[in-house]
């Protein structure tokens, strides 16, 4: 297909009218297997774990949005992350952001280290430290930017250059930004991955993971891993995600506009000790937003000073739903220390700024005045 601009690609990439009926929407191919014409002859599909036409459409769609050649859809963000780490042989050392999603920390420390991978969780926003952390056996540098939940940025171009210099794989978890705001492959990163559960789907009604790359060696291995590990995205989830990406642009614009207003409002509240949002001028990496993102996004975290304050605040929000996850049209609020980051030991957690008073907000696309009124009401109770 001809290459169009972002919003056009979001609506059309990977999708053609159904050849048998002309249906404009890609059908949900609910089938586990495909009838073959004769031995060794098929229509490109053999078995559902290997491939499915609805999944193929989504894989092509997200690959186009990330400016990548190959996309692979998984059952969840964690299944995607697991597959990416499976690209490495036992004995490999990985440099990884110390502020990643708690589940990434959990799979690394509690599962993959038992199989011979070595993880060094460091502050990847400090490029000198990244360079210093490299060992003989370093095979991957894995960053999350902006980080979950303290909203630190890592310089993607510097990470890509470092990785190329030393022939190691560079990976970015692009979940918080979405390809609308940030396209890591354009900056030289090898692999961009997502929890598709979040902004790509945008409606909190499915789970999924995506991996996109321009490197055919990696994509071939990842397809082999899909087939072998089996953590693939189901057809109905792929269809829901495809429907979601059609509105990614309009959703992201509204998410970002609301977040900017809310972040400014939060900075003016005396009961709030600190607001983490890269769109604020006083955010230490505000300039980097301009360098590698088209906007700072719609994730904000702020510190209420103590667990008691956070508890009171979260008990009194009504419109903002207390729930894990992010990136849906509805505003979600969470407490990283006891929810998304509970698997990180307390001293490690405090070191990376995930304090007991920290609250994370995934700003939705409701009327911003209603979100602010809800936050204001809850804050009065603190
Ligand atoms: C940044 C990030 N990466 C990965 C994941 C894991 O994705 P999933 O929940 O789809 O497995 C999450 C989940 O919250 C996340 O926030």
Image: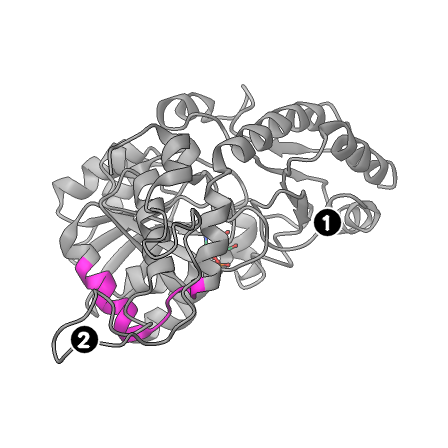
Q: Nearer the viewer, residue 18 or 196?
A: 18
Q: Position of residue 135 (x, y in %)?
A: 19, 53
Residue linked to disc 1 = 321
**Residue 53 figure quarter:** bottom left
Q: Nearer the viewer, residue 250 or 46?
A: 46
Q: Who comes first in sequence, dot 1 or dot 2?
A: 2
**Residue 159 figure quarter:** top left
The quarter of the picture where the N terminus appears is top left
**Residue 277 figure quarter:** top right
Secondary structure at numbered mark 1: strand
Secondary structure at numbered mark 2: loop
Q: Is residue 60 left or right of residue 198?
A: left
Q: Residue at x 36, y 47 (%)?
A: 17
Q: Residues within 10 Å of mark 1 (few under 14, many from 20)?
A: some
| Range of residues picked out in magenta | 220-235
Q: Residue at x 31, y 74 (%)?
A: 229
Tags 1 and 2 in contact by the CB under 8 Å rule? no
Disc 1 vs disc 2: which is toward the camera?
A: 2
Q: Nearer the viewer, residue 164 or 2?
A: 2
Is the stretch drawn in magenta largely helix, strand or loop? helix
The quarter of the picture where the C terminus appears is top right
Q: Is residue 266 magenta?
A: no
92 versus 186 height, above or below: below
């Amino acid at each position: 297909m001809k290459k169009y601009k972002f919003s056009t690609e979001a609506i059309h990439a990977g999708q053609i009218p159904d050849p048998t009926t002309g249906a404009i929407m890609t059908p949900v191919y609910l089938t586990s297997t495909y009838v073959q014409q004769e031995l060794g002859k098929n229509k490109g599909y053999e078995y559902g774990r290997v491939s499915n036409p609805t999944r193929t459409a989504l894989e092509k769609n997200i690959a186009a949005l990330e400016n990548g050649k190959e996309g692979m859809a998984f059952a969840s963000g964690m299944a995607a992350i697991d597959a990416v780490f499976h690209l490495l042989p036992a004995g490999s050392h990985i440099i990884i952001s110390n502020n990643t999603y708690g589940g990434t920390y959990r799979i690394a420390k509690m599962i993959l280290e038992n199989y011979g991978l070595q993880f060094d969780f460091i502050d990847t926003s400090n490029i000198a430290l990244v360079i210093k952390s490299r060992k003989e056996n370093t095979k991957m540098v894995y960053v999350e930017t902006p980080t979950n939940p303290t909203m630190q940025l890592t310089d993607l171009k510097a990470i890509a250059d470092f990785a190329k210099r030393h022939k190691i794989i560079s990976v970015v978890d692009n979940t918080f930004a979405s390809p609308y705001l940030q396209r890591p492959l354009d900056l030289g990163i090898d692999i961009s991955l997502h929890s598709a559960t979040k902004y790509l789907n945008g409606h909190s009604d499915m789970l999924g993971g995506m991996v996109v790359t321009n490197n055919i060696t990696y994509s071939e291995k990842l397809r082999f891993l899909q087939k072998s590990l089996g953590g693939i995205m189901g057809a109905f989830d792929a269809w829901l995600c495809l429907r979601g990406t059609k509105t990614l642009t309009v959703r992201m614009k509204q998410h970002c506009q609301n977040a900017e207003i809310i972040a400014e409002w939060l900075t003016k509240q005396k009961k709030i000790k600190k607001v983490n949002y890269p769109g604020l001028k006083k955010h230490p990496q505000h300039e980097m937003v301009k360098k590698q993102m088209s906007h700072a996004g719609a994730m904000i975290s702020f510190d209420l000073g103590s667990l008691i304050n956070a508890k009171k605040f979260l008990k009194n929000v009504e419109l903002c739903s207390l729930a894990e996850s992010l990136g849906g049209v509805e505003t979600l609020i969470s407490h990283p220390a006891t929810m998304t980051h509970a698997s990180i030991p307390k001293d490690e957690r405090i070191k990376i700024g995930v304090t007991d008073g920290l609250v994370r907000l995934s700003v939705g696309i409701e009327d911003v005045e209603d979100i602010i009124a809800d936050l204001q009401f809850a804050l009065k109770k603190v």
